[in-house]
Image: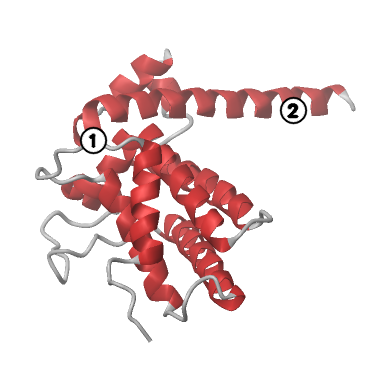
Amino acid sequence: MNETNVREERKQRLFKQNKMYILKAAEIVFAQNGYSMATVDDIAREAHFSKATLYRYYKSKREIFLEIIHNTIVEARKNIRKIQQKEMTSEEKLRELSRYILSYFYKKKNIARILYLEKFAYKKISNLKPEVKDSLPYQHPPIPGLMKNEMEEIFDIICEIINEGVKRGEFRKVNVSDASFIFGALIRGFFLKGPVQKIVYSIDESVDLMNNFFIYGIKKERKE
């Protein structure tokens, strides 16, 4: 390898390292302040870079936040795929999957809450005008393309696990897409607990409770 190639390799390595430092600093700032209150100055200060240096790597706060979210979803998707490929029953996969997602939600809880709760901030992130309303009050604003692709793949993996269970005879025949949607809704419900929920569940308790209701339901078994 000649000197020019070595120099370019070092330059690329430094560029990636500095981006990593900025993203780590930004995640701390977003977690502490939320998206709306966080500033580029805050992120630069946390990363120990000048504001001018930070702008060499990212054009805006929005671009930084989108990369954090995208990287987070990519990491989750890779680990969820690993669970799907394990040699275990479909029920065991769902239990391990819910344990992983709940643990990951908790690890990234402040970042996740921005996506789920800061709708005004999310519209800014998605380049939507503040006055643009969702077609229905309960719909989430549109998701940027790359993030949507990753989230759809995660949804498809859950569908594969449930469909696998149906084919093996572990689960009754169901609409796999509907079941995957309900499974995801249950997990989000445990993460975004409402004000009337007074009990604080551990990860293990959450996994058992969620999966028991998802797998077995609450209807009494009918006598033949």
Observer-nearest of 107 and 164: 164
Residue 94 percent across, percent down from the top left: 49, 56
Quadrant where the image shows the N terminus = top right
Labelled pair 1, 2 in contact (Cβ < 8 Å): no
Residue under circle 1?
200
17, above or below 177, in the image: above
134, above or below 21, in the image: below
Label placed on residue 182:
none
Query: Mark 1 against mark 2, which lies toward the viewer?
Result: 1
* Direction front: furthest residue: 223
Residue 16 percent across, percent down from the top left: 60, 29
197, above or below 220, in the image: above
Residue under circle 2?
9
Quadrant of res 60: top left
Observer-nearest of 65 and 156: 156
The three-letter amino acid code for the residue at tag 2 is: Glu
Badge 2 density bin: few <14, some 14–19, many ≥20, Cα 10 Å? few
Badge 1 density bin: few <14, some 14–19, many ≥20, Cα 10 Å? few
Q: Is mark 2 on a helix, strand or loop?
A: helix
* Direction right: furthest residue: 1
Residue 100 percent across, percent down from the top left: 48, 43
Q: Residue at x 49, y 59 (%)?
A: 154
Q: Can residue 40 be seen in this view?
A: no
Q: Which residue is drawn at 40% across and 55% down?
A: 211
The three-letter amino acid code for the residue at tag 1 is: Val
Q: Is residue 163 visible?
A: yes
On the picture, is 148 further left or further right than 197?
right
Observer-nearest of 212 and 160: 212
On the picture, is 128 further left or further right than 160?
left
Residue 146 percent across, percent down from the top left: 47, 57
**N-terminal of the two: label 1 or label 2?**
2
Quadrant where the image shows the C terminus = bottom left
